[in-house]
Image (tube, helix red, strand yellow):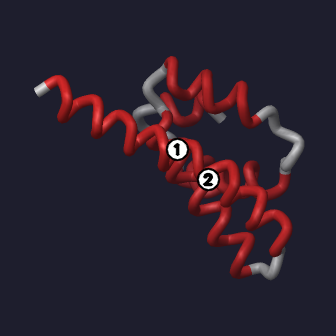
Amino acid sequence: MLSALKTKNLDSRLAEALPWVLLEQPELDCQWLMSAAKVSDLQNKLGFLTNVARRLAEKLGKNETAMLLSARSQPWSDLVWYEKKLYVTIL
C-alpha cells in the first residue's frame, strides 16, 4: 500500500485497486499503516484512500466495514486539524 502511494506514476489499474484493498482486508494493521504513512509523509493520501473505501463500503451496503473505515479515518481528521493548529501557532 505505502509503496504504491509513494509511486509518482502509478498505473491507473493499481490506483483503482487501492481502496479495494482497504475495503476487503479489514485485518490490516491500521496503527502500523498510519505510523508508516506519517513517517513517509503519505498520511493525506492514505486518509483519502480510506475515505474512498468507506464511501464504497456504504454504497455496497457493507455497513460494518463502512463503520470500521470511518473509525480508521478519524485519526487522519484529528491529525490534519492538529497540524494546521501547530502551523498557525508557529507563525
Q: Residues within 10 Å of mark 2 (few under 14, many from 20)?
A: many
Query: Taking 39 as reference, is 58 left or right?
Result: right
Give me the residue at 49% from left, 29% from top: 6
- Quadrant (top left, top right, bottom left, bottom right) of the N terminus: top right
- Residue 50 shows which numbered tag? 2
| Label disc, if present, on residue 13 of the rendered structure | none
Q: Which residue is mark 1?
A: 76
Residue 13, percent from left and from top: 61, 54
Residue that protrudes farthest toward the front in the picture: 89
Q: Amino acid at mark 1?
A: Trp
Res 9 → quadrant: top left
Tell me which residue sits at (83%, 74%) in the image: 62
Q: Nearer the viewer, residue 56 or 7?
A: 56
Q: Amino acid at mark 2?
A: Thr
Q: Earlier in the sequence, mark 2 or mark 1?
A: 2
What residue is rendered at 68% in x and 30% in y?
A: 33
**Rendered view: 88 above or below 64:** above
Q: Check disc 1: other Cα within 10 Å, few if <14, some if 14-19, many if 20+.
A: some
Q: Give the image location of residue 70, x and y in percent.
A: 67, 60
For the image, the number of numbered tags is 2
Q: Are marks 2 and 1 in contact (CB under 8 Å)?
A: yes
Question: Which residue is at 81% across, 63% downward?
Answer: 65
Q: Nearer the viewer, mark 2 or mark 1?
A: 1
Q: Outermost residue, top direction?
A: 39
Q: Is 83 on the left or on the right of 2, as rendered? A: left
- Vertical placement of 83 versus 35: above or below? below
Q: Report, in whole angstroms, how far the alpha carbon at label 2 lies from the one at label 1.
A: 9 Å
Q: Secondary structure at mark 1?
A: helix
- Which quarter shows the C terminus? top left
Front-most of residues 73 and 24: 73
- Name the spot of residue 7 as percent of width and height, x first: 48, 31
62 versus 18 height, above or below? below
